Amino acid sequence: MKKYLMTGVAAIAMCAAFTSCSNKDDVEVMTQSQIDKAKYDQAFLNYVGGNIAANQDWGFSATANSRMTRAGEAAEVVKKDVWQNFPEKLEGATVPADVTKAEADYVYEWFQNNPGLTETGKDWSNFFIQQVYGTMNLQKKGIWHRYDQNRINNGYESNYYDEEFNDKGGMDYLTVGDGTNMTHVNDFNAETGGPWNIVFMKNSSALKFGYHSSWDNSERQLFKLAEIEVPGSCFSDGVARKGWYVGLSLLAEKYDNGEKILGYQRQNYGDDWILKIVPGESKIEYDLRIWAEDLSASGDSDFDFNDIVLDVKYDASDAIICLRAAGGTLPLRIAGNDEWETHKLFKVATSVMVNTANGKHTEIEPVVIHTNMGINNAAEANTKLKLEVFKNNEWQEMRAPLGEPACKLAVDKNLDWLNERTSIKGTYDKFVPWVQENNPNLSKWWE
């Protein structure tokens, strides 16, 4: 446990600020942000009794508040005839519209003209897979590194030479998963997409897509995920749509008097088998909630930790945040983005407190933002979702350093935030003991 006597620090800060000490050369002048932080730290320490556990991480450990999968449930391939008879299998997800022929043609042409494999999918547990395009009935080009022991005898410099060849490759079945645990998607093949051209993946993962090839009896994960805007002319209502599409590249190798590599010429295009994936969550299930205080607290009732309240949905490439409340009356921004200033997002004046009055926590609709950054746990949320307040003419970060006074807390995703000017320790009597001890038995101090 760390025991603090920070009064001296705050006093030094004030002394440095006014430069009234007897010898300025003996004092390292503090910046305004350091002074503001010293004042906040002192107020926080007074509030919690002067002690903070040395290992106190404020809920932002890599394992705390992590997204939990449903233990014991294996990935399940739900086919159309199954969900028609047992709609509860979809868990409230809405079945997407069929892929139109014009949509399929447009997407196929897009993959043909945009090379490069990403091999990174989406961190989705429930999602639909729809057939877009399959070309397994067509001959594929390959390169044959042939060997002929008589070539040198016939005047050539080497017995080896390259020759193109054509053959039909077999993408027999689709696999999806996290790269290590891959599920065979039954009755869904590269030519027809199975009997219904659609399946629902439940309790699965859309991080990796692969296939089995009968040509060389191999399994590979060569794919590209792309968000493509398809023009309105491809749909009956004339409205353009964005969708997530996966293109798989056929590549197969075997020896036949030299190495034969089928799909060699087009291995980086992902145009051999194209799928559409649609998230099947009926609503976003967030993994973590963050409460933040904007460095202005001084008295007990100021520590309500509702100046910023936001939720985080973990994702390996595009984490989602949902801004729930903004009790601060100073400019507050998220991840260093001026467009993500909380009042601007809520479309209110800076002086307006949003969703923190008693009984009015849902008065203004929350704001959902795709971050385009990978956030996989609470520790990454702490560092990547930098929260800042514009105070004394500069942006100052609201931190949660290990074992030191904190401006933000990671809490349960369903924990309602406090009303304005409601003391956190006055509401939750385990809060201060948790701060001082970081006892695992107190980790859910709000219960």
Image (spheres, rainbow, N blue to C red):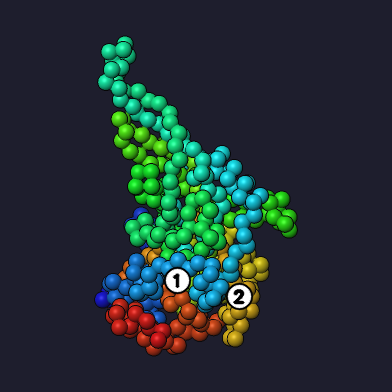
User: Along the line of sight, which residue is nearer the eye, 420 or 362?
Assistant: 362
User: Which residue has dot 1 on it?
Assistant: 287
Tell me the mark number nearer the camera, choosing from 2 and 1: 1
User: Which residue has dot 2 on it?
Assistant: 354
Q: Residue at x 43, y 46 (%)?
A: 170
The percent position of residue 62, horizontal first and vertical second, equals 34, 66
Q: Is residue 396 visible?
A: no
The percent position of residue 332, horizontal first and vertical second, equals 55, 65
Measure the alpha-carbon separation of dots 2 and 1. Answer: 22 Å
Local SS, label 2:
loop
> Among all residues in the image, which is located at the extreme top?
155
Q: Is residue 269 visible?
A: yes
> Among all residues in the image, which is located at the extreme right?
237
For the C terminus, the image quarter is bottom left
Q: Residue at x 64, y 54 (%)?
A: 100
Label 1 neighbourhood size at 10 Å, few (<14), some (14-19), many (20+)?
many
Q: Residue at x 62, y 46 (%)?
A: 105
The percent position of residue 373, horizontal first and vertical second, equals 47, 56
**Is residue 306 shown above or below 172?**
below
The kind of residue on which mark 2 rests is: Val
User: Along the line of sight, which residue is nearer the eye, 235 or 407?
Assistant: 235
- Occupied quadrant, residue 168: top left
For the N terminus, the image quarter is bottom left
| Horizontal relation, residue 41 to residue 127: left or right | left
**Is residue 143 shown above or below 57?**
above
- Occupied quadrant, residue 69: bottom left
The kind of residue on which mark 1 rests is: Asp
